[in-house]
Image (tube, grey):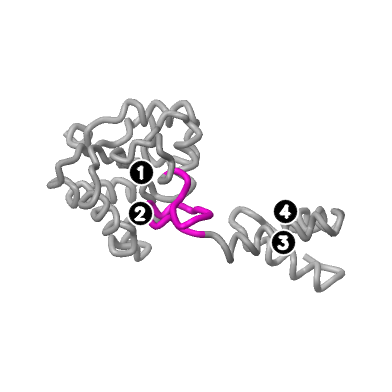
Amino acid sequence: MNFSSKLLENAVNEFSRLPGIGQKTALRLVLHLLNQPADDVTKFSDALTKLKSEICYCAVCHNIADEAICEICNAPKRDKGLICVVEDTRDVMAIENTNQFNGVYHVLGGLISPMDGVGPSDLSIDSLISRLRENDVHEIILALSATMEGDTTIFYLYKKLKDFNVQISTIARGISFGGELEYVDEVTLGRSIVTRVPYERSIA
């Protein structure tokens, strides 16, 4: 792609580094920004700068937050004894959109994937175990994607958690194998949370 301006080229190259953004889409976005008032572009760039410099990760659940403890963990009406374990923040948002869950979350920060060099020590598993030891937890929901990596992580977590006096359940498999939570429609995901089953039964 030929550019009439080095500044334009640099901006397009940066946008095209984003997931799912090719150079044509990046060019369209950059040209759109060029046509906006300077104040709007400044707000856009300030929002990105503040996102990177000021964002926090909840000290309890590891979800993205504005404060040391996120709004969900701080909410007095949430059932702190019901913990839903998810891969990342996108899954928290997907489950929250169903309005079917009133517990709290634990964000692993990924899935066990030896092919990608991701092992248990790379995930926030130790802090999950600490939460079980330090709090009155009655149920853990393993809400991970129906993929090989998701199932491997669920099996590993079950082995680590099964000796605690806590119910371990998984979301019902109305979600097809290979499906990732963030792409599942809200109705199906909501039903999967509500109709969750004990993990032992899911592997029987």
Q: Secondary structure at mark 1?
A: loop
Q: CA distance from mark 3 to mark 2?
A: 32 Å
Does residue 140 appear left or right of residue 5 in this picture?
left
Q: CA distance from mark 4 to mark 1?
A: 31 Å
**Residue 25: mark:** 4
Q: Secondary structure at mark 3?
A: helix
**Residue 144: mark:** 1
Give the mark toward the camera: 4 or 1.
1
Residue in front for this viewpoint, 195 or 3: 195
Instruction: Please tell me whether residue 16 belongs to the stretch shown in magenta.
Output: no
Which residue bears the numbered disc 2?
111
The kind of residue on which mark 2 rests is Leu
Give the mark toward the camera: 3 or 2.
3
User: What is the x, y in percent for residue 142?
Assistant: 30, 42
The quarter of the rendered structure image containing the N terminus is bottom right
Q: Residues within 10 Å of mark 1 (few under 14, many from 20)?
A: many
Q: Quadrant of residue 78?
A: top left
Give the vertical position of 83 relative to 41 (above or below): above
Which residue bears the numbered disc 3?
45
Q: CA distance from mark 2 to mark 4?
A: 30 Å
Q: Which stretch is magenta?
A: 56-72
